[in-house]
Amino acid sequence: MPTIGQPAPDFTLASTSGQNVTLASFRGAQNVLVAFFPLAFTGVCTAELCAFSEDYARFQPADTVVLPISCDAVPSLKAFKRQEGMKVDLLSDIHRRASRAYDVLIEEKNHSQRAYFLVDKQGVLRWSHVESELGQRRDDAELLAEIAKL
């Protein structure tokens, strides 16, 4: 698992925007909330991602971009985003490299745990939380409170 106070593992992932997204590209510009979620089209993941989308405007003034990541393929993530009317782009970790780098991949299930990693503008990991059960998630208010501590 990445260590608080150390540089966050970098990654480049395909996005529902059609562009690749690299964590390091936000250095010096924005904080990043890296949010791993297990699977598109599932109940808790849908609620979580819809909340990110609904609260999108609350993360922007906090100078923070949310990068939701799952092991689903981009076409599935695009369909999920379209079906739910999400504003936030979703990232595909189809090769599971980011999930392994952040030590959140459940190998036997071939998807990630639900986990959050807050990376500051210098690219340093400042806070993390891994859910003990897939059916649990952090509320956006809690995530925004952690961001406010930066």
Image: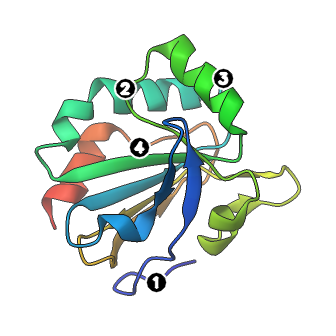
Q: Are marks 3 and 4 in contact (CB under 8 Å)?
A: no
Q: Which marked residue is nearer to the observer: mark 3 or mark 1? A: 3
Quadrant assignment for the N terminus: bottom right
Kindly report which numbered mark, 2 or 1, lies closer to the viewer in this rendering.
Answer: 2
Of the residues shown, which amino acid type is indicated by label 2?
Lys
The residue at the point 66 percent across, 53 percent down is 93
What type is the residue that disc 3 sits on?
A: Phe
Q: Earlier in the sequence, mark 3 or mark 4?
A: 3
Chain-order first, disc 2 or disc 4 = 2
Which residue matches tag 2?
A: 87
Q: How far apart are the alpha carbons under marks 2 and 4? A: 19 Å
Q: Earlier in the sequence, mark 3 or mark 1?
A: 1
Q: Check disc 3 and report the residue beneath it.
A: 41
Cβ–Cβ below 8 Å for labels 2 and 3?
no
Measuring 53% from the left and 23% from the top, which residue is drawn there?
A: 81
CA–CA distance between discs 3 and 4? 18 Å
Answer yes or no: is residue 43 visible: no
Helix, strand or loop at label 4? It is loop
Q: Of the numbered discs in the image, which one, if any, rests on residue 3? A: 1
In this rendering, the answer to whether 129 lies above or below 111 is below
